[in-house]
Amino acid sequence: MSVKRLTILCALLLAFLTTSVANANCTRRSYIDAGCDSCGVGIGLGNVNLTSAYLQPVGSPLGSTVFRITSAARYTSEDLVLYECDAADAGSIYEVFATNGDDRVGGFYDLGATDGNDNYFATYFPYVGIKLTHLNSGTVFTRYWQAYPITSYATSGDKIQIRVKDFSPIRADLIRLSTLPAGGVSNYCGYRSSDLTYGMASTSSTASYSCIQPNGYVTFKGPGISSDPIGSDSAYNYATWGTGRWIAMGMGTAPVSTLSYNVTCVARNVTPLVLFPMISQQALTNGATAQSQFTITLECDNAAVSGVSSGATALGLQVPYESYVLAKNRGLVNASDGVSYLLSEGYGTDANVATGVGISLSNAATGTSMNFLGWSACTRSGCPTGNDAGWYSVLNGASSAGSAAEGYTTYHTVLTATLSRLPGETVTSGKVNAKAYVWVRVQ
């Protein structure tokens, strides 16, 4: 009898423990609300400039940046713990994200699709579309809720803790659109069917992004903490919005973006492939370098101002984001976010890629050493500017090459790329394959 009773008690105890594990829920550790319209993350794109359709046709890139939710005004630290879950829940915790799908200028209209540029959504700035990309997954934000596993977290005993910094960085890209948005499910900042510019920034003069509607949201999903259904349309599915668990991101959140209509310049062409002569590992180790020049073709409105001050037009070459992260980890990024060396794709991960070497930049006409542009978003203190950040007067060292249209002048700028040993690094043999992006932008 006693043996039988013991077996029953053990079975009941096992059942209780199994039930407890199965029903373990994540808990919210911080009740800070970063989802209200003006208290989330400023995307940090700085000034956006629209100019003539001749220089800047539909589809032209207008700006790009990478930001993290760690910059949300209400978060006191990137190590702030937002959620805590059992260690066994590690495979069941997700970031969930979508555009601000119900609002006319927040993420309802994919106007880029009209021009063949999918997933660029209407913004408060007329004819300016934004695309948001969740970098950990490479997934582009749409109106439809998407999820991606969170794999970075802290541990505390048998618990895992999801911190602010464990959410993915997000990339924002802007392009020029051909159309304006009609009415959305929500028209918080205004709408008139007879005048589509109503409820938007000025179409002719300088303006700030005064509509506080976010461009996107990210939130958390885990055992016991739900989200709106994955795959559902955020324009009509936002039941969890009032929980205070959403994190908003917007061009109208500090640092607020601005819009200008300055005459400027554009990059028309660039040497597509820059080849270095062969150089040995030993020669690089001994301080030798390999060089190659390339040409950027520019076209400027004759009234454009070349410079790095506010309202002037500047040129910069930006490293890819992955290269930027590598450079920053190796101390190759200065306090202004300028990058001293461009690193090869596959650096440190591909055994066939040379390490201990990088590519630096200089102006062939002036001999001036140049920094590459990094990826830091603008902050409340301002945007990365000047030579230290990688911006240079657009016509620095440029030579005139005639005119292709009345009122405009073509220029050629020759830059020198130099492959050399990185300071303090050991050179290993292998290939070098790197790319950079040419930006011409009103400051």
Image (cartoon, rainbow, N blue to C red):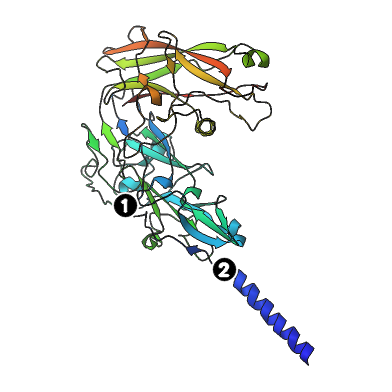
Q: For residue 171, which quarter of the picture?
A: top left
Q: Which numbered circle lies on residue 290?
A: none
Cα distance between the residues tagged 2 and 1:
33 Å
Density class for disc 1 (Cα within 10 Å; few <14, some 14-19, many ≥20) is: some
Residue 365 in the figure: left or right of residue 352: left
Quadrant (top left, top right, bottom left, bottom right) of the N terminus: bottom right
Quadrant (top left, top right, bottom left, bottom right) of the C terminus: top left
Marks 2 and 1 in Cβ contact (< 8 Å): no
| Amino acid tagged 2 | Ala
Q: For residue 389, which quarter of the picture?
A: top left
| Amino acid tagged 1 | Asp
Task: Single out the residue that lies furthest toward the bottom.
Answer: 1
- Residue at which label 1 appears: 37
Task: Single out the residue that lies furthest toward the front.
Answer: 424
Q: Which numbered circle lies on residue 24?
A: 2
Residue 312 drawn above or below residue 143: above
